[in-house]
Image: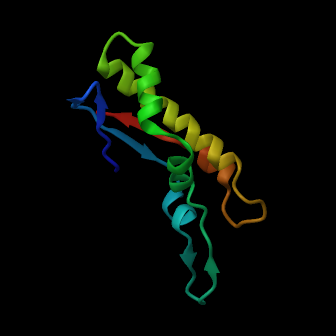
């Protein structure tokens, strides 16, 4: 899990919430695997690609502008990021041994 802090107007804001993302079969498909016979199946690191593409502080600031509370803004940000992961998964290379469409559909977000 990655932790992010948002600084607005030079005030550090902390939200006592966590977002956990889970994908069925995701670890192997993300990192790649080596089979017992030595065959390597490369992964597609959609989380890293998404984090490079999406500017989380800007995404959070946009959600704060349309929310009634920081908690609501955090939850909306987490949901928007889940959608961004799905969009990145939709762009996964074709012809890999992993079913990235099924992985995208299995995306689970838990807020604590």
Closer to the camera, 6 or 50?
Answer: 6
Counting the numbered discs, the total is 0
**Image quadrant where residue 40 sits:** bottom right
- The color scheme shown is rainbow
43 vs 73, left or right, is right
Q: Please state, as top left, top right, bottom left or bottom right, where the C terminus lies in the image.
A: top left
Rendered location of residue 19, percent (x, y): 35, 38
Regarding residue 105, the answer to whether it shows in the image is: no
64 over 4 or under it: above or below: above
> Residue at the spot x=55%, y=75% of the render?
33
Rendered location of residue 35, percent (x, y): 57, 82
Rendered location of residue 23, percent (x, y): 50, 49
Residue lying furthest bottom: 37
> Residue at the spot x=30%, y=45% of the render?
3
Regarding residue 37, the answer to whether it shows in the image is: yes
100 over 80 or under it: above or below: below
111 vs 54, left or right, is left
31 vs 94, left or right, is left
**Image quadrant where residue 8 sits:** top left
> Residue at the spot x=69%, y=46% of the render?
90
**Image quadrant where residue 63 sits:** top left
Residue lying furthest top: 68
33 over 50 or under it: above or below: below
> Residue at the spot x=47%, y=30% of the render?
59
Rendered location of residue 77, percent (x, y): 44, 29
Residue lying furthest right: 95
């Amino acid at each position: 899990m990655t932790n992010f802090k948002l600084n607005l107007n030079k005030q550090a804001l902390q939200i006592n919430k966590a977002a956990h993302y889970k994908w069925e079969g995701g670890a192997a498909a993300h990192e790649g695997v080596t089979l017992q016979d030595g065959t390597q199946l490369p992964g597609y690191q959609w989380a890293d690609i998404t984090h490079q593409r999406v500017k989380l502080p800007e995404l959070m600031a946009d959600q704060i502008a349309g929310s009634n509370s920081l908690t609501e803004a955090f939850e909306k940000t987490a949901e928007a990021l889940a959608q961004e992961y799905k969009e990145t998964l939709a762009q996964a290379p074709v012809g890999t041994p992993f079913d990235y469409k099924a992985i995208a559909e299995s995306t689970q977000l838990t807020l604590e």
